[in-house]
Structure formats: C-alpha cells, structure tokens
Image (cartoon, coloured by chain):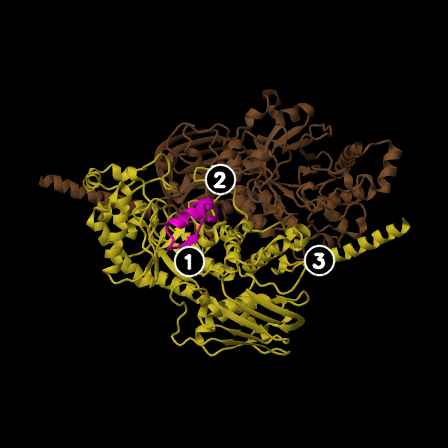
Amino acid sequence: MASLILCFVICVFLTVCNSQMEMAENPANNNIFRSDYRDKPIIGPIPRNITYGGKTLEFHECGMMYHNSDSMLDEIIDIYNNVTFGKNYKSRCQDNQKNQIHVHLDFKKKSDKYVPLGFDAEYERYELAVDEQSNVNITADYYPGIVRALDTLSQLIEQTSDDNNEQYDIKYVPIKITDYPEYPYRGLMIDTAREYFYPDVLKTALDGMLLGRTNSFHWHFLDDDSFGLFMKSYPDMVNYTAFSDKEIYTPEDVKEIVRYAQVRAIRVIPEIEGPGHLHITNFYPEFKGVIGCFRNYTDVSSYHGGPPYASINPADERTYTFIRKLFTDLKEILDTDYIHLGADEVSYGCFSNLDITKKFLKENNMTSGDLFEYYIKRVREILEDVYPGINAGYWQSNNPVKYSGNKTVLQVWGGSLKETLKGHPDTKVIFSSASTYYLDCGYYNQYAGSSWCGSINSWKEIYDFNLGNEYSAEDRDRVLGGELPAWSEMNNEFNLPLKLFPRGAALSFRLWNSKIPKHYVEVPEMLVKHQYRLKSYGIPCSRVTQRYCEKHLHHCFGKEKY
Amino acid sequence: MAYLGQTLVILLAISLCWGKYEILNNQASENVYRSDNPKGPIVTPQPHYLKNQEKHVKFHECKVKFKYDNDMLDEIIGVYKDISFGKGYSERCTEASGGKDIQVEIKFDSKDKTYLPKGFESQHEAYSLHVDGKGNTKIEAKHYPGVVRGLDSFSQLMTRTKENESEYMMEYLPIEIKDEPSYPYRGVMLDTSREYFFPETIKQILDSMLISRLNVFHWHLMDDDSFPLYLESYPDMTNYTAFSPEEIYTPKTIKDIVKYAKVRGIKVIPGINGPGHVNILGNYPKLSSIISCYRKPVVNGLAYGSPHGGIINPLEEDSYDFYTNMMKDIHASFECEYCHNGGIVPEFNCWNSSQEIQDFLHQGGYHQNDLTQIFFSKRKEKAQDSAGHQMTNIYWYQSNGIKYQEDDILQYWEMGGKIDREFAKYPKNKFILSTSEMNINCGYLTPFGQNSQICFSPMSPDSYVRFPSMSQESKKQVLGVEILAWNQMSNEFDLLTKLNPHSGASSMIFWNSDYELKGGYMKERLMRLQYRLKRYGIPTSKVSMRYCEEHTHHCFGI
C-alpha cells in the first residue's frame, strides 16, 4: 500500500513536471513553433527528395560560418540569418569565434541574374546535405536555387530550448535533400489601383512571399480607380490619376521594390491593364475623351466591380501613344521577363458611339468585336518593339480573342483550363480560378453585399486543390503554375498581409511538391510553422488554426490518412 | 445639337476640374473623411436632440482652450485632444499662436470623484453641448460618462480644413445638442482564453470602444483553452493554465486596465465559466478533483469550438471553495459590480459517465439541468453572498428551464428569430442582445480550414447597424447590446480589424434607436468612424472601396 501511495506521488510529480515542461515550451511566447509529435524535419514545402538520420548537431547562433566566394549571396545570407535567428543577427554576432556549423555554398552561377529570364523549374533546383561533422553543403546552378536552399536550412535549424535562446540545433542528421519545384510559377497578385499601398507594405509582402516560397509578384498598378505610377513621359499625370500626392510610386520606388524582390528570388510582373478598366486615364487632360462614358454610370452592378469602370478606345491613336510611352518608361526602371497586358472585362459601350470609332470601323471594315482583337495585336506589337522577346500575359475567361505563340501566357481566372489549352494550342497558362484562388472571395464587398465568388478560399481549399487534374499529360509543359490574386477593393494596409498569408504559402507549397503527405496533419503543421516564421520576422498573418490546436496539432488533426 | 455638344464639353470640363481638385486633396492620405454631400453637422451616434444654423468658424488647433475645475477630467481631455487633432497634440501646442481662442467650458460637479456610477442607466451618459456662433462651447453633464460623451460629440464637430493641416473649422453654428443613449449597455466581449492578448492590444480595443461610444468591456477570462488570470489564492496556477509564463494577467495589469477603461467611460465585467468550458482547470493538479472528463473530447471533434471537454463536478465541495477563492481575488483586482458567470450548459455525456453523479441524480429524482441549477445556487451562496461580495450576475441565456433570479441579467446569444418567445419566459429579467450575427468571428474560417456553418461569410459593418426584430414588450426587457469576439481564429494582427468599425456600427443604433440610418448617410457615418479610428492609430476594416470613400453619395445614393 505504501509503495502504491509512493508511486502515486511520483506519478503526480511527473505529471506536474510534464505539464510545466509543456508550458515552458510553448511556441507562441517566443514565436517558435514546436510540433507535439516529431519524427522528422518539418519543412514547407516538403522537399522532393529527402533522407535523414537521427543525430543532433548543437551550436551557438553566432557559430554559423559561411564559406562563400560570391558577394552576390551576401545579402540573402544576412536575410536568412535574421529569419533563422531573429532580427539584428549581425549586431549580436559580430565576432564569429564559436564556429561550429560550416555552410559551404557552391554556387555555379549559370546566370548572373538574381532571377534568370523565362520560366524554368531548374532555376530553383538545389542540393543540400548536412553531415555529422557539422558541414552543410549547398549546391545550386542559379541564384534562386541558393535562396531556396537557405530557406530549407533555416527550417532545419531550431532553438534548443526556451531558456537559452542563443543555442540552436539541427536534428535528424545526416540529411540529404535534392529539391526543385514542380511548377516554375507560384504567384501572388497585389492590386495597388483599388487601394494604394506604401512601398514598406509591399516590402513586407515580399518578405512574406520569400518565406512562403512564392516566386512571382504580379503588380496590378493600373485600373479604373487610380494609377499611382510616376511616368517620365507624362510627369504631371499622377497629379490627376493618383489618389493623392503622397500615394505615388516614383521610379526610385519601383527600382527599389524590384531589386528588393529580385534579391528574394521573386520576379516582378507589371500589369498594363486595358482596354477595359481604364477609367482613370480619362482624368488626364491629354487623354480627355479617349473614353466616351467618363463618369457616366447609371447601374452600379453592371460595371465589372465598379463604379468607376470604363474601357479605353482602341480606335483612338492616343491609346497606343500612351501605351508605348508607358512601356518605354517602364523599361528604364524595371527589368522583367514577363509583362501582363490585362485584357479582361472589356465593354464596348464606352467607345462604340464615338465618331472617331465609327469612322475607324468604317475605314477598316471592322466590327466592335474586331476592335478588341485589334487592340490586342497593336499593344503586343508595341511591347515586342520595346521589350523584344518578352512573355506577355492576358487574363482569360472564355475570351473570344484567339491568342497564340509560346511567349503568350493566359492567366485563367474563369472557365476551364482544359478548354483554354485546347482553344489556344501553343500558349502557356497560369491557373487563377476565382472559385479556388481569388483571395477576395467570401468577404463582404464594397456595397456590403456578399462576394461575387462564393465563400472564403481557405488555406485548406487552396492546398487541397490538385492542379494536375485540370489538364492532360501532353499539356504538362504548357502549365506554368498558379497565382492568387488579391483585388483590393476592400483591402487596406491592415488586412492585406492577413489575406495574403498563410494562403500564399498554401499555394506554393502544393505547387512546389504536389505529392500530399501520408498524414494530413503535416499540412497544417508546415503552415503553422510558416505562420510562426512570418510572425517572428514581423509579418502579419492570419491563423491557420486555433491556439490550442497549434500546440496539439496531432490531437486536433489526428494522424488520419489523407 | 451643337448646343447640346457644347454643354457636354462644359460639363466634361467641370468634371475634370473637380477630378483634379478631389485627387490632390485626398482625404485618406491625411486620414480625414470629407463628405461629398455635406448636409449639416454629423455627430455619430446621432444625438437625440440637435439644432443648428449656418455660421462657421476657422481656428488654429492650438487655440482650443478647455476650462474646467475638476482634475478628474485632465486625462480624458488629453485623450480627446489627440483624437480631435491627431496624436502628439500637447507636444505640438506648447506656445500660444495667433488668432482668437475657442473656449470650451465643462460644467461637471462630481463630489465623490466617481468615474462610473453604479448600475446601468441612460442618464449616466447624458450631456448637453452648446456651441455659439464663434465656436465657444459649453459641455454640461451630471456624471463623468456624460462628460466623456460630450467631449466625443464636440470632437466630431471640428474638421481639418483642406488648406492647412493645423487649421480646423466648425460649421453649422450655433449648435445645440441634448443627448443620452437609448440603451445604457453597449458592450464588447473579448475572449482571452482561446488566445492571449497583451495589455497593449486590450488598451487599443478600449480606445476603439471610446471612439465607438461603447461602454462595457466584458472580459472572458476563463475557458477550455487557457486561464491566464493570476490568482493570489493559487499563485502557481498560471504555470499550468496560461499559454506561457509571459501570457498572464497579473493583479497589477488588471488594475491598470480597469483604470484605463474607467477613464474612457467603460465598465469592466470579468467573465468566468462553469459548469461547462473549464477544461483548463484540470491542468492544475490542485484542482484535478473538481473536473470531470478532463481532456476527454465529449463529442466527436469539437465541443462548442473546443477540442476538449472537462467540466465542473458540482457534487465536489472543493469546486465551491475554488470559486470562493477565485471570486475573492477577482473582486480585489476588478472591484467589480457585475460578474459574468458563464452558464452555458455543459455536455451531459460527461456527467453521465460518472457513477457518482448518476447515483445522485437517480436518488434525488433530478435531471441534469437541476444539477446546473444546484451548481449556480450553491456557487452564488458560497462565493458571493457568504463572502460578502454584492454583485449582479450575468449568465449566458439557456432556453432549458433554468430558474434565474429576477435581478440576474441574461445574455441572449442564439439566433435572432425567437427573441419574443424566449424573453417571455423570463418577463422580469433584463437581456443583453448578442445574437449569433453579433459575433465578429462569424463567417470566418473554422480551426480546420473550413467555411463557417452559421454565417456564410464575414459580416459587413452595415449589418451591425440593425436592431433585431422583436415586439415592443420585448424591447422593454433589452438592457443593451454586446458584440462578441470569440477568439479561436483571431490573433493580435486581425482582432482589431474584425472589431472595427463593426462594434461601433452597433452602438450607432443602440445609442439612438429612433434615428433611421440609410444609404449614403449611413455609409458616411461608418466611414467617418473608420477614419477617426485610423487617425488614432487603430487598425480597422474598410467600409467600402477607396473610390466610394471619396464619392460616398455617388456610390450609395442620398
């Protein structure tokens, strides 16, 4: 009996200690995620090929020794030191005496660009090996590969305990990873025309994209509501087209944002919307009258998300003058392999009754429908003239225009991907279906009504969606990937990052490796880890699940098979 | 025809000029909302009596001089200077500048220095405000909250001019306002058990409540997931029940927050739970005996949003000792007049699984509901009455025949449709309205990444400008409204954007339920609130798109 009591006392004691341990190891108070069940490294996205062992390497945070012969990598190494060990790493670790982890960077530099031109999954390929002698060997042909390797490494490194926050470890050594994405395009679109976002907000978004392995930032800066880009060719235009004199992107801002993105292995895709959704251009005196229905709306609901809404006139030569100057100005400040040319939601009503249009149609023996086709052709010619050989993107939803050419990218936001592939035989496609990928769906709209595209597309819907089911095998090489658009009618600086994250990662984690884990809990697990990484780097983020479940993922999500 | 064309050109030219003017003087970049169809002074909520004329006056921000003889008002006047003119007012306005003063005289004689009078009565917030043709103002109130509301209305009468960022104007003078709320209880409940929020975030919520004219902060401290309140009686408890050692509310923190709220005219009501939703107490070894079914999910998946289901064992005497000790500590730091006692009926499966409880029910011929009743009565008797803590109890209303006392306040949290029927069951009780649409998280995702089953999608602020439909009889039982923030899926980044401007929208209608708000005029008020919050540094959602902020009446009509 006495021994029974003793045993009981010990048991209680153990329970007490255990729960205290649990409390002390709580993830949220120091922004570190710890899973309640561990038997392998947690990396999002799951590497394509990984083997691991059972040893643990412990080291001091200042013990990271990089063997790097290329100064091009200095900046991203600094960024990842801050991501891994917390901000201000450099000032904490000035003398690097406690060398314990040697990171050997073998950068083959097959291109000297941060983001090599064109869409190729090989650009992000890397190999990473951690051996028992504290060596980390990283090999990559291209810069983005190095960035992804550093990202994976930063996820392998964890704080050992909460009591000593300078001690870190890498578990499951030796580790060997060979990794590359399944889809070369994993994008987020931000609409800065419906609402202006200061460059700092965009940089925060780019930091979030880096950690979520998003590699394309589609910048929708021109739409009905505002055009905040300063153009050298029309220096007074923003006086008329920006929301205010403070809400402008100067050439320096753009250069800075593009550079910021490229260092993070993110391409920037500017979008020149047209001929629809260009109401704002009519505010500029030089383009007065290019739009025939300026501010003339009667029915709010019929105007493609407006008012305001208006199409620019493809029969008016001033349209092309504007677009040529826009491309020319852009080229000076923005080096890119892909420009988006919009072309969604065109209404002819705004220009078909203008005299200039009637005359043009008569002279050229065209219908109003032909005009749209004519606009596409003219703009493409100008683009080719200014940016030879560049990829051009178009919004696509059962569009009547016959697009062609392997430098043409159709961003499918409605209708079927299969049909689009069939109807435009040599183009590339990016999937952005509103019903799964639009980030504004489900939230109340600007008229306090419900969203036009159903309920909120959750991280789970986005991750669970299998892009591979949307096309046939022979079209595989034509499918570049997917993109989540964040239309900004109802976004502001407070909620933009919350709408982007963690859903951006849910998309790119799945597009990087479409093979779903055996136990579904690994999906919320890598997303919760991502959420904590964002938070510790100062990036606002929505929750994946409730606090209790973050701590007890396996209790909440079980070990059920997917 | 030519004449028509000419007219069109002129019209176009005019609209272009307007376009330019509008854009260069944009409101959002300076966080000031300007109506595109101004029509008299806009004070939100709409005062019950407002009369105005057509004079206006311009003045420098530093020329507004407050005259009062009660130092209780120092702090709130400082707060309202920052709300009216932007933060950092006292640093900007150190020396006198030119122009005439705007005199603001406050008549308030409180002998006992009480911030918040006892009880909930509309007259506590009553005030009158008179601005003469030169801008000189007189605010009169009997009670402190009335002064706060008077200052709030006054702050809304002043707008920054477009020309000069330190120049303000008051229009439509002289103005005469007499005002008090239709309903004296306009609250926000914050769940700090599903997620911990640091005191800074709570203070931000209190600031937003001040600007939104909400006067009750119901602090839901205890639930299944964590219990972060430090109790003197159980000093080691938070080691087991808080999310982490940093995520704790100490008595010092509580007192600080209660004081912060009080200055802003906000009463703090602590909320505890029992018999349901107390699983976390089972983490604490000293209390393990009072919890049945610790960490056992009692239904498949989630039990009311919690993945575990420990509940109080009402037959255990220690249960009441715990509540007695806890109430003593809560009373010491909150000095509360009201206590929210939970009361959501637990999963009976849990009690059913205990032989001891089964025997008790069987021998007494009791139903499980009776056990809840026994728990309520015994807890009240021991933890409040015997301990000498006189307080009014608030319960989550349950339509299952529980006998409440006549002075108990019941919080109605079910769907709106059957209010009349349910209120009629307790004709002598007062109700707080928190229908399921009044939960700011309604419509957001579940913890499992699924869409909400109750609300199809997040609710717009407009939907909060609505009084639930009910009979005139039922209306007499309404004490007020409370917006609920259950925080399974909120964090420090999104909480404020979910609360704002929604909770302020509800107070528009509960402050003045006789004033009909619609079209552009309702949107205008919501946007004005959004800009006032943003200017004071409080995160908020948008009411509409940017374009419609500048063209409110164009987008939404007159």
Residue on which disc 3 sits: B22
Position of residue A434 in the picture relative to residue B190 (left or right): right
Q: Quadrant of residue B532?
A: bottom right
| Mark 3 surroundings within 10 Å by alpha-carbon count, few (fewer than 14), some (14 through 19), many (20 or more) | some
Q: Position of residue A10 (x, y in %)?
A: 18, 43
Quote the CA–CA distance across marks 2 and 3. 46 Å
* Front of the two marks 3 and 1: 1
Name the residue at 42% across, 65% down.
B262
- If the image is split into quadrants, where does the N terminus of chain A sit? top left
Residue at the extreme right: B2
**Three-letter amino acid code of the residue under disc 3:** Glu
Asked if marks 3 and 1 fall on the same chain, the answer is yes
- Which secondary structure, mark 2? helix
Residue on which disc 2 sits: A151
The residues colored magenta run B412-439
Q: Quadrant of residue A122?
A: top right
Q: Name the N-terminal-most of marks 3 and 1.
A: 3
Residue on which disc 1 sits: B217
Residue B417 drawn in magenta: yes
**B265 w.r.t. A62: above or below:** below
Q: Position of residue A2 (x, y in %)?
A: 9, 41
| Mark 1 surroundings within 10 Å by alpha-carbon count, few (fewer than 14), some (14 through 19), many (20 or more) | many
Task: From the rendered image, report the letter of the chain displayed in yellow.
Answer: B
Q: Are marks 2 and 3 in contact (CB under 8 Å)?
A: no
- Picture mark count: 3
Q: Position of residue A325 (x, y in %)?
A: 77, 45
Chain letter of mark 1 equals B
- Which secondary structure, mark 3? helix
